[in-house]
Amino acid sequence: MRDFFFCGMFLNVYIRTDNLRYRKETLMPEDVDTLETKRSKLLEEFLSLGDLRPGSLTAVMRRCGKPSCHCAKRNDPGHDPQFRLTRRVAGKTVTETFPNPTALRKAQQEVTEFHRFQKLSQDLVALNEKICRLRPVEQQRGGWTEQEKKTLLRSMRKWREK
Ligand SMILES: [Zn+2]
């Protein structure tokens, strides 16, 4: 049995678009306003996400085991492959098979969409980290508020009573 990973194809596409986006980013000056605009656009992209779910799609080539069958020959592609979606649920691998190519294509679309979601999430976190670093600390107002004074005095009285 040999497993062929199908998701590699989709991943390449995303890595390429990522590189293009990165190149564009480095040319622009990055201040909090620019980054906030980018964040708004990114958040809008989340709305375009369709049905999504995690998992790895694999095609398992099948050989029936009969010595007289064509599949017993070397370099024979074997019988129709069985397509599977595997994912980890609470530490265990759950496998799903697909009855027909249409069901498989639907699952492929859902997994592709999940990868898009992951990419968007990573971008969103990276963008937010930049914003957090650049965002200045708010100006401290001088003095104590009345509430702060009361709370502070109350706690000081408690210390004295001990
Ligand atoms: Zn066979």
Image (cartoon, grey):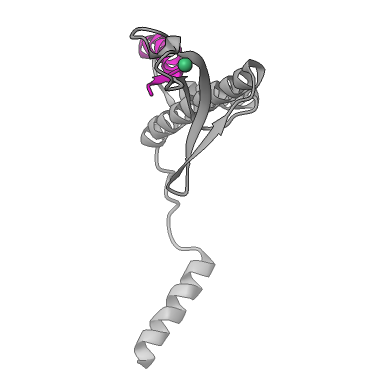
* Camera-side residue of 129 and 33: 129
* Position of residue 92 measured from the top left corner of the image (x, y, whole percent): 44, 46
Q: Residue at x 39, y 34 (%)?
A: 129
**Residue 100 as seen in the image, left or right of residue 85:** right
Q: Residue at x 38, y 30 (%)?
A: 130
Secondary structure, magenta segment, majority class: helix
* Position of residue 66 measured from the top left corner of the image (x, y, whole percent): 43, 20
Residue farthest to the bottom, as pictured: 161
Relative to 130, does residue 68 appear above or below in the rendering?
above
* Camera-side residue of 30 and 126: 126
Which quadrant, please, contains the N terminus? top left
Relative to 61, does residue 75 appear above or below in the rendering?
above
* Camera-side residue of 40 and 111: 111
Which quadrant, please, contains the C terminus? bottom left
Q: Which residues are magenta?
A: 1-28
Relative to 13, does residue 52 appear above or below in the rendering?
below
Q: Is residue 96 visible?
A: yes
Q: Residue at x 43, y 45 (%)?
A: 139
Magenta residue check for 75: no
* Camera-side residue of 45 and 149: 45
Q: Is residue 37 visible?
A: no
Count of numbered tags: 0
Quadrant hosting residue 143: bottom left
* Position of residue 7 measured from the top left corner of the image (x, y, whole percent): 45, 19
